[in-house]
């Protein structure tokens, strides 16, 4: 059985895919860690399209979305079983903690408004690119769509920062 070195870090292919959007911390091989920033939200922050405060507010929003169970579960298909829809799972929270995150996400979403929430949901939560969201907003031009999505994302981040401070 080959020995796997956990301190090796990401492969060259992974670093290439990150396209420079990562930080390396630690100097020695044993303490070196890579922090990848290649999600569409992190790229907008690294390109200084949104402020650090907006970035962290949007990340907090996405955290509540994921912890609320809105991302769906990771499930695998068992080909030896018959698929049966569970009608009792009617979108109810599985715990008080999950309900807390749903309530917090819903309050933040309501506070920032429909259009900013739409962009925040797709970029920060679902990981769609700004170009994809611009097209969803109805722009024919990728450049105009990306610019509009970026402006709305910044507005969402700003409104969330104000909301988080007030709550």
Image (cartoon, rainbow, N blue to C red):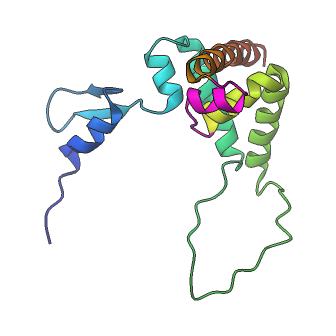
Q: Is residue 33 left or right of residue 27?
A: right
Provide residue 57's location: percent of width, then percent of height. Answer: 63, 21
Q: Verify whether residue 152 appears in magenta.
A: no
The one nearer the camera, 22 or 34, is 22
In the foreground, 143 or 147:
143
Q: Residue furthest front?
A: 140
Q: Residue at x 55, y 70 (%)?
A: 76
Is residue 128 rendered magenta in the image?
A: yes
Give the percent coordinates (x, y) of residue 24.
27, 27
Using the rendered view, name the quadrant where residue 37 is placed.
Answer: top left
Observer-nearest of 140 and 68: 140
Tell me what residue is drawn at x 64 percent, y 14 percent. Answer: 154
* Image quadrant containing the N terminus: bottom left
In the rendered image, which quarter is residue 29 located in? top left
Indicate the quadrant where residue 163 lies: top right
Residue interval drawn in magenta: 126-140
Q: Is residue 4 placed above or below 88 in the rendered structure?
A: above
Residue shown at 68%/12% (left/top)? 158
Q: Quadrant of the C terminus?
A: top right
Which residue is depicted at the point 72% across and 27% down? 137
Q: Position of residue 67 (x, y in %)?
A: 66, 44
């Amino acid at each position: 059985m080959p020995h796997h070195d956990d301190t090796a870090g990401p492969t060259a292919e992974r670093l290439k895919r990150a396209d420079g959007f990562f930080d390396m911390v630690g100097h020695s091989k044993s303490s070196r860690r890579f922090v990848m920033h290649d999600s569409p939200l992190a790229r907008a922050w690294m390109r200084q399209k949104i402020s650090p405060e907006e970035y962290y507010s949007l990340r907090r929003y996405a955290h509540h979305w994921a912890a609320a169970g809105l991302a769906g579960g990771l499930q695998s298909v068992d080909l030896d079983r018959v698929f049966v829809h569970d009608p009792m799972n009617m979108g109810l929270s599985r715990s008080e903690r999950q309900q807390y995150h749903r309530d917090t996400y819903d309050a933040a979403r309501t506070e920032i408004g429909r259009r900013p929430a739409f962009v925040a949901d797709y970029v920060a939560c679902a990981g769609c690119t700004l170009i994809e969201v611009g097209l969803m907003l109805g722009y024919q031009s990728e450049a105009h769509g990306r610019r509009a999505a970026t402006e709305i994302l910044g507005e969402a981040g700003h409104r969330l920062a104000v909301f988080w401070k007030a709550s």
